[in-house]
Image (spheres, rainbow, N blue to C red):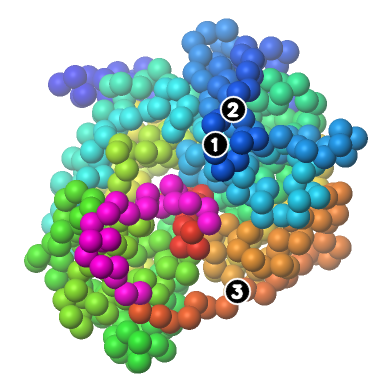
Amino acid sequence: MRKAIALLAAVTAVAALGGTSASAAGPDAADLADTGQGKLVWSSCNDAATPALQCAMLDVPVDYADPHGRKVSVKLNRLPATAPKDKQQGPILLNPGGPGDSGLWMPVSVSSAIPADVASTYDWIGFDPRGTNGSDPHVVCDAHYFDAERPDYQLSQGTSKAWLKKAAGYAADCAADWSWLLPHMTTVDNARDMDSIRRALGVPKINFYGGSWGTSLGSTYGQLFPSHVRRMVLDSIVGPTISWYDHNILQDKEHQRRFDAFAAWTAKADSVYHLGTDAAAVEQAYHQVEDALRKEPVDATPAPGKIGPAEFEDTFYGGGYNFLRWPRMATVLSAYLTGHDTRPLAIAYNRYAAPGPDDGTFPAYNAAQCTENAWPRDWEVWKKDQAKVNAVAPFYTYNNMWYNAACMFWPYQGNPAGRLKITGKGLPPVLLFQATEDAATPYEGGLAMHDALPGSKLVVQNGGSFHEILFHGNACLDDTFTAYLRDGSLPEGKGRIAKTCAPEADPAPVYVTPPPAAAQAAPMAAPAAGLAPTDPEAVHGVLR
């Protein structure tokens, strides 16, 4: 009853709050004389590998309309510039996406990926968005929401009622405990936090690099505070006008294309994986394993619970973000079907999909996406729309639908006007990077952002599929980024696409042999966005 009352109260009393921030108008409209932010007191992060890394907490207002009201704290870290003072170029804020992913790994990782003579000229600033990770508070709505074994995603399995109850319960849990903060966890609120960081740093302008949802965050900051932007790089771009609901449909279709590409790649390596010599046979093998897991889920050790069809699908969709996962994915199918060996599946699940100790950044994901656009509130509308998509893109459609289903019940109505309009007025030239085969932020988004930002330059990786395409060893891409950070140099090409780069080669087909049983029992790497940036199979900036 407590949940139902909280949900009803939130819907009726705070229904318009989802659109309040997003309706902010015009360049520098939010450039207030005083945002009520606290002071930065830097101290050592006690990082043995990087002793120079500094940490701090910054108090910011929950509601920027009430700058001296209730505060939350944002966690930051900084790798200071080491170049002579007259060569330094100021702070560069970094965001990997999410919404809500931690950016604290980025100062060390990104700065080490470019030449030292350029990296040394910037203060590299990472941060955890409000309400997430090391920021205070860390919002948790249901720590067990992702626990295995979850209901089957496929509507044909009769689990719709279970998922609707689960999604509605999650929205109610969030409303019951976090109604004071959730309406203020939008992209606009996070952009204003970035300007509070700028103010606390005492600088007139910042630089910015963002990937995935970070491109929405960066473009939003640029719309609100164009005079405070020095340089900005957006990598793997969310289109500035598309609704989140429609964006998910685009994702479904692109993930299907990437799964088809994985199946074709695996079929060419039949001598390694023995799953068939055509893509249809490989896709049939995938469904064969999923059907088997419906009848007999397998142990997820060292993660708790069982791997059923939902956990199996979650293990595989990340191949659309990073094709270096393909050898491990093909090994999972091969090992299961040729020897009923479930060890590769358990290892892949633990690396890619096993949940953390709570619901991670999921509250922040919903707080942004569910309120920045209007979502259908009627299950029949969802069911009809998604059935049409599933008919052409069955690999990911229902997985993605249930991941976003809390928006059907979210206690704060989405803004019918959509996200903040991006015009680029007053911004310096922005450098854009986009791969044509990106499943998470489809190619259309890069084109749309370029069209929205006069003076921007779009670099396209034709045939590329990494989600966030920089820092994978592609010199054409990385050198363009470095040149821009060095002195503002931009590609000279005219027209919609200023520069085209070639894709990376497909991975070599290898059978990923499981480690000995004793090693397998040891804890696996943290899943998805928590993987070390140096892990070639890691996925950052996950915009589900």
Pick whichever of labels 1 and 3 is earlier in the sequence: 1
Gap between marks 1 and 2 measured at Cα: 8 Å
Q: Is residue 327 magenta?
A: no
Under tag 3, what secondary structure?
loop
- Which residue is nearer to you in this view: 491 or 536? 536
| Quadrant of the frame with the N terminus | top left
Give the residue type that dot 3 points to: Glu
| Relative to 480, residue 238 above or below | above
Q: Which residue lies at the image location 64% right of the left edge and 15% below the top edge?
A: 39
| CB atoms of marks 1 and 3 within 8 Å | no
Q: Residues within 10 Å of mark 2 (few under 14, many from 20)?
A: some
Horizontally, is 75 left or right of 288 in the view? right
Pick whichever of labels 3 and 2 is earlier in the sequence: 2
Q: Residues within 10 Å of mark 1 (few under 14, many from 20)?
A: few
| CB atoms of marks 1 and 2 within 8 Å | yes
**What residue is disc 1 on?**
47
Q: Main secondary structure of the magenta part?
A: loop
**What residue is disc 2 on?**
44
Q: Is residue 383 visible?
A: no
Horizontally, is 519 left or right of 424 in the view? left
Under tag 1, what secondary structure?
loop
Gap between marks 3 and 2 measured at Cα: 38 Å
| Relative to 200, residue 293 above or below | below
